[in-house]
Image (cartoon, rainbow, N blue to C red):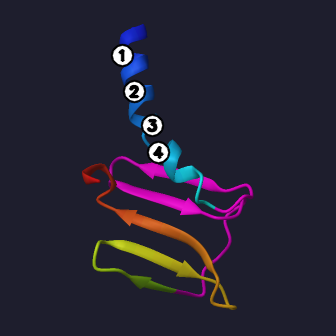
Amino acid sequence: MALANYQEAQTYLKFLPLLHDLPKQPFFIVYDAEADVLYIDFSNPPQSAEDSELTDDDIVIRYDKAEAIVGLTILNASQR
């Protein structure tokens, strides 16, 4: 059991270098395994988006009224 927990932890530890570049404020991350979607909100609680755009690599960038990025929705997250 400890080995399985260690292997699962290693999967999550791959994200640590990416955390350095995220905004230095509380944020919210949720992974929906059934839909294979990772939601990242740059405020906690999450802020409503007024607009969004889908990039060529299946990332939805969500914007507020001032056109600031409030979050990302990463489609097909397990394939990254």
Q: Which region shows up in magenta? A: 23-51
The CA distance from mark 2 to mark 4 is 12 Å
Q: Which labelled disc corresponds to residue 12?
A: 3
Horizontal side of 68 relative to 1 (left or right) equals right
Q: Are marks 2 and 3 in contact (CB under 8 Å)?
A: yes
Q: Quadrant of residue 67?
A: bottom right
Q: Residue at x 74, y 58 (%)?
A: 25
Horizontal side of 60 relative to 70 (left or right) equals left
The location of residue 7, given as percent across then percent down, is 36, 22
Q: Is 44 within the magenta?
A: yes
Amino acid found under the numbered disc labelled 3: Tyr
For marks 3 and 1, the one nearer the N-term is 1
Q: Quadrant of residue 42?
A: bottom right
Q: In which quadrant is the N terminus drawn?
A: top left
Q: Nearer the viewer, mark 1 or mark 4?
A: 4
Badge 2 density bin: few <14, some 14–19, many ≥20, Cα 10 Å = few
Q: Name the residue tied to disc 4.
A: 15
Q: Main secondary structure of the magenta part?
A: loop
Amino acid found under the numbered disc labelled 2: Glu
Q: Residue at x 50, y 52 (%)?
A: 18
Residue farthest to the top, as pictured: 1
Q: Name the residue tied to disc 1.
A: 4
Please say if 12 is above or below 35: above
Q: Which labelled disc corresponds to residue 8?
A: 2
The location of residue 73, given as percent across then percent down, is 45, 67
